[in-house]
Image (cartoon, rainbow, N blue to C red):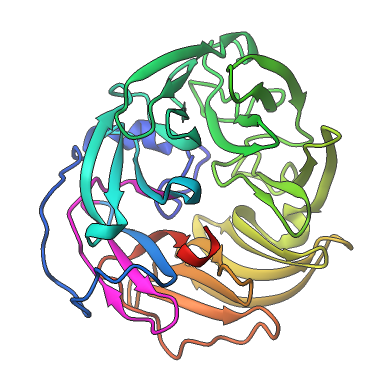
Amino acid sequence: MNRPPLQLFPVIALLVALGSAITACELGDDTDNTTDTDNTTVDRPMALITTSDYQTGSYATVDIETRAVVADIATIHSDAICAYEASLDLPLLILRLGADAIGILDRNAGFDIVGEYSVVAGTNPQSIAVVSAERAYVSRMGSPFLLVVHPTAGTVIDEIDLSPYADSDGVPEAAGMFLHGGKLHVGLQRLDSATFDPTDHSSLLVLDAASGMIETALKLTATNPLAVMHFNEALGQAVIIESGSFSTLADGGIEFYDPTTRSLSGLVITEAELGGSVVDTVIVSPTKGYAIVGIVVDESATTRLVAFNPATGKKTKELLNATGWSYGSLALSPDGTELWLADRTSTSPGLRIFDTATDAEITTEPINVGLPPASICFIDPVAE
């Protein structure tokens, strides 16, 4: 299998092999191991962080302004990522392979877990797109069907058959999703079920969000679009990471998609230029972006945080590097002035924060959030 053990096993099919070793989700163990016990004030920007040591998982919150942390809020599945729907003020946990569920958090109750629903055992949910208080979509790598549910109750509304858009194994490996202009966009990895390598191409599927009707499928420039797919307001375009095969740097990069014209940019920067397979990226402006990239040489992995210019397709700076698959995910603060990095380095894991104007690190040491950080979601009540 040509797949590195990336951070929280994000959309990587290595999870299928590891699934038997991952314990089921444990909810409701509210341990009070915190650096700040006041987690009930909600009228300020917060960051929700999922954490994991690959054996167990938890989550934390960080006050964006004061950096105060509430760690180890509850024990959860070891492979979980966060999501947030601002229109409903709805923080969510996507509990992936081995738990296969969606967890509901209440921001007004200290981010306690107040609900959970299954999305069918073994289906490996990757992303949730909330259309309204009554309708949401859940992409699942292990199922040929796109699930339509009530976002908090979990009641199944519909299942949309994606098998006509799959490779020969019949499962298209639906991963990242984003909503824009009343349309749902779904990345289909189309991996070989035996090797988990990309097949001849990957796709971006466009559906009407209200009805679930499939409108078109676009062939991506490269293959293996990761689950970290989002619409970027600064660009007016979606950002798609296409990692290709993790055994080579010759087949992947970052692509933009314009949902208004339904046009793809081609790779704005390649993995070869970035110096590794892309794990995550954020775009600050048309001329500035950041990426986590990883590379394996002689069975030894290195992870790097780099800056690049999307307009020229050139890497501009390397900010950090570490041995192993140490850097997990990136997030841009709501005001765009800070880059947050989930650093999973074994000796000193935590959150590291950088100034996006100067690339200088703001934190003097990683912010401890309990277990090593995995995913980062910003929750900004002011922006709702």
Looking at the image, is 246 positioned above or below residue 197? below
Q: Please report the residue visible at 76 percent of the width from the left and 67 percent of the height from the top.
A: 308
Residue 277, x across and y down, in percent: 63, 52
Q: Please report the residue visible at 29 percent of the width from the left and 29 percent of the height from the top.
A: 153
For residue 254, say whether it is visible: no
Q: Please report the residue visible at 50 percent of the width from the left and 42 percent of the height from the top.
A: 3
For residue 37, say whether it is visible: yes
Looking at the image, is 230 positioned above or below residue 215? below
* Magenta segment boundaries in residue numbering: 55-83
> Is residue 75 within the magenta segment?
yes
Looking at this view, is 221 or 236 the one in front? 236
Residue 55, x across and y down, in percent: 22, 51
Q: Is residue 196 left or right of residue 184?
A: left
Determine the residue located farthest toward the right in the rendered image.
312
Q: How many marks?
A: 0
Looking at the image, is 305 positioned above or below residue 253? below
Q: Is residue 264 left or right of residue 281?
A: right
Looking at this view, is 244 or 180 the one in front? 180
Looking at the image, is 335 positioned above or below residue 95? below
